[in-house]
Image (cartoon, rainbow, N blue to C red):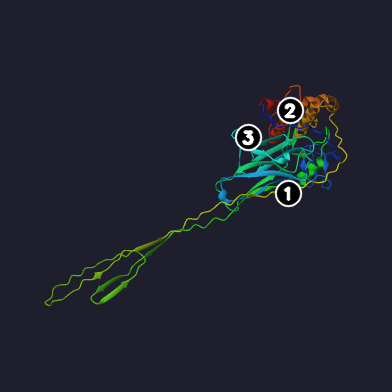
Amino acid sequence: MCKLFKKSISIITACLLACPLTANAVDKNIYGPQENGSYISNSNNIYTAEEINTSTVKPVLSLSKTEVDYTNAGQQVPVTLSVKGADKAWNCMGVHIYYDERLILETKTNGTINYSIGAAAEDIPFSVADSTDNGIFFTCSGEANLGRDGDIVTFYFTLPNNINPGDSFPIEIKYEYTILDDIIATDLFTNRIDNLSRDELMEAYVFTKGIENGYINVTGKIAATTTPITTTMIMHTTTAINTTTTTTTTPKPVTTTTTTTTTKPVTTTTTTSKPITTTPKPITTTTTPKPITTTPKPITTTTMATTTPAMTTTAPITTTLPSTPTLTLGNVNLDDDINALDASLALSIYAMRSTGREEEVNKLFSDIQLKNADVNNVDRINATDASLILAYYAHTSIGGKLTFEEFLKK
């Protein structure tokens, strides 16, 4: 059994925010942003670049841009995922973040990612998973319009010990999707509105126009290395023979060779003066530079201002459910895709039943949907089911191959 998320859940409300339906996608195995600026949702709806520009809500997801002095080698650096332009207009997210392989992702003692939830998502159940290819997947799901502008989540990296000024470590948001048998897992950033509709147009805007990637850049200037200078001073050596004086100067230690000449005796007396050789010791002067003390510069992180967009409502989406739905744990809305939207529906069922609205639940959800929502098969749907659906979405979004049943056993 995977770890449960003990996040308090408030009662889910409905909202009439939605977007117009467009033509069906030709290839159901292609999702997300396209080269021509259009977007294909996991509901197989195509939104053109022109339609995307008309979105009432224009969210921008950004990663922090941080500059670090090179003397902070080996230190921990926080990175934050933030949103602006969608205050009280979103509630479901599934985002892949990839980082430079030289960075070390910080984990807790139990091996899970070390992260903290920001104010923008503090009231939304959260889940996270990491992959083997320098990627992280964050997902959350809550009631309609519960997401705020601001910081969504902060996570941490340790810098390498050998960083140098000019090094750059990119951190990027990239849209991803996986298809496993009949289950599809795509990235999301949307607002679950009711049982059958959501704001796909804001999601199209995010992944085609609203991504601001981040980085950790290394700054500073390495001080030049100074080698101690040794100055050797050699004194003059003067040799006086009879009345002749010779002066010799050499930069290297002087080696003096003395040659002795023997003169045969004569009948006259000769006074011979011996050569006087004076060799002073070399004088060595050493100049040692003062040590260079470098004080690490503080880490500065660029923060972003948040704005609150004006919000309007449009006609709700009409979605056609499969004619012969089958039992698939986690697939609450029967769209062959298990993600944060299904978790949101599980929370909705839980909220309605908690407030005595069983009749409303029976009108909105079929028996198959209720069985799919009760993923732990205990004959009741609650926040635990929603958390398990989120966790399974995270599992499949990083390439996990387990079925929901296998995932629950593990």
Name the one closer to the observer, 405 or 145. Answer: 145
In the picture of the structure, the residue carrying the numbered disc 3 is: 112
Percent coordinates x, y for residue 23 in the rendering: 86, 40
Circle 1 crowding by C-alpha within 10 Å: few under 14, some 14–19, many from 20: few
Identify residue type, mark 1. Answer: Ala
Name the one closer to the observer, 174 or 23. Answer: 174
In the picture of the structure, the residue carrying the numbered disc 1 is: 305
Q: In the displayed structure, does residue 236 sit left or right of residue 375?
A: left
Closer to the camera: disc 1 or disc 2?
1
Whether residue 215 is visible, yes or no, is: yes
Circle 2 crowding by C-alpha within 10 Å: few under 14, some 14–19, many from 20: many
Circle 3 crowding by C-alpha within 10 Å: few under 14, some 14–19, many from 20: few
Q: In the displayed structure, does residue 225 sit left or right of residue 27?
A: left
> How many marks can you see?
3
**Where, by quadrant of the figure, is residue 1 drawn?**
top right
Could you tell me which secondary element the residue under label 2 belongs to?
Answer: helix
Number of the label disc, if any, that sits on residue 385: 2
**Where, by quadrant of the figure, is residue 354 drawn?**
top right
Percent coordinates x, y for residue 289 in the rendering: 46, 59
Q: Are marks 3 and 1 in contact (CB under 8 Å)?
A: no
**Where, by quadrant of the figure, is residue 207 drawn?**
top right
Identify residue type, mark 3. Answer: Thr
Residue name at image x 75 percent, y 29 percent = 330
Could you tell me which secondary element the residue under label 1 belongs to?
Answer: loop
Q: Earlier along the polypeptide chain: callout 2 or callout 3?
A: 3
Whether residue 327 is visible, yes or no, is: no
